[in-house]
Image (tube, rainbow, N blue to C red):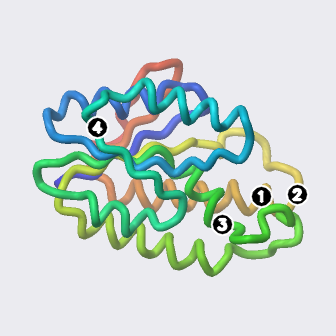
């Protein structure tokens, strides 16, 4: 069993790198997709991702209960690819108050529960897991309490998952820089 975290910015090639690792593993692949189609542009992105994946890969769409989905899909002969932690964070962090981000001083109880479940699942998974996440902490401190909370929690989540991972890559311009393992 191995955990691999792939970090990078938007359109850096991180999903492509994760898919290449999954393909090269020779194992059956389950993709856990965390995106939800909140608008037409996001719906088109989801369709594009579906079309780009090999037809034999199993896809599970799970926007919130990620730890449970990993445990259900993980097996010694299978690779689980999670794409992506950043969208999962957005789905869980603010709970049902996603439109009142600036008024929220702390993560939702849903996020606290699901984050713990995710980290526990990574420790218990019986197969290989590859997780994709955006590195969003390289810019300026954003305006708005909700935006700062999101950036802070994304950084904390990436650190916790990196600590649980045997391998970590940073992707920039389609090139993988090994950070761990």
Q: Relative to residue 167, is residue 176 drawn left or right?
A: right
Compared with 127, 123 (above or below) is below
The foreground one among 150 and 180 is 150
User: To which residue does mark 4 refer?
Assistant: 57
> Distance of mark 1 from mark 4, alpha carbons?
36 Å
Question: Residue 95's x, y, as percent?
Answer: 69, 71
Q: Are marks 2 and 3 in contact (CB under 8 Å)?
A: no
Choose the circle earlier in sequence order: 4 or 3: 4
* Spatial separation of the CA atoms under disc 4 and disc 3: 29 Å
Left or right: 86 as drawn, with respect to 165: right
Decide if residue 63 is on the left or right side of residue 56: right
Along the line of sight, which residue is nearer the eye, 99 or 143? Answer: 99
State the residue at coordinates (73%, 75%): 106
Query: Which x, y percent locates residue 164?
Result: 33, 60
Query: Tag 2, which secondary structure?
Result: loop
**Secondary structure beneath label 1:** helix
Determine the secondary structure under disc 4: loop
Q: How far apart are the alpha carbons under marks 3 and 1?
A: 12 Å
- Who comes first in sequence, dot 2 or dot 3? 3
Could you tell which of marks 3 and 1 lies nearer the N-terminus?
A: 3
Image quadrant of residue 70?
bottom left
* Vertical comparison of 8 with 73: above or below: above
| Residue visible at 40% across and 50% down in the picture | 32
Q: Are marks 1 and 4 in contact (CB under 8 Å)?
A: no
Q: Which residue is mark 2?
A: 144
In the visual, does 122 lie left or right of 49?
Answer: left
What residue sits right under mark 1 in the picture?
Answer: 148
């Amino acid at each position: 069993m191995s955990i691999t975290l792939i970090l990078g910015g938007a359109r850096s090639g991180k999903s492509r790198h994760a898919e290449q690792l999954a393909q090269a593993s020779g194992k059956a692949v389950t993709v856990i997709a965390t995106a939800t189609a909140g608008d037409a542009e996001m719906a088109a992105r989801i369709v594009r991702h579906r079309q780009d994946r090999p037809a034999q890969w199993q896809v599970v769409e799970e926007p919130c209960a990620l730890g449970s989905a990993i445990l259900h899909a993980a097996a010694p002969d299978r690779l689980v690819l999670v794409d992506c932690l950043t969208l999962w964070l957005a789905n869980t962090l603010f709970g049902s108050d996603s439109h009142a981000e600036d008024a929220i001083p702390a993560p939702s109880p849903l996020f606290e529960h699901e984050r713990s479940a995710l980290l526990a699942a990574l420790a218990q998974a019986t197969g290989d897991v590859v997780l994709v996440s955006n590195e969003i902490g390289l810019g300026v401190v954003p305006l708005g309490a909700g935006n700062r909370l999101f950036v802070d929690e994304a950084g904390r989540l990436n650190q916790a998952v990196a600590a649980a991972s045997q391998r970590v890559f940073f992707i920039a311009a389609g090139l993988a820089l090994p950070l761990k393992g």
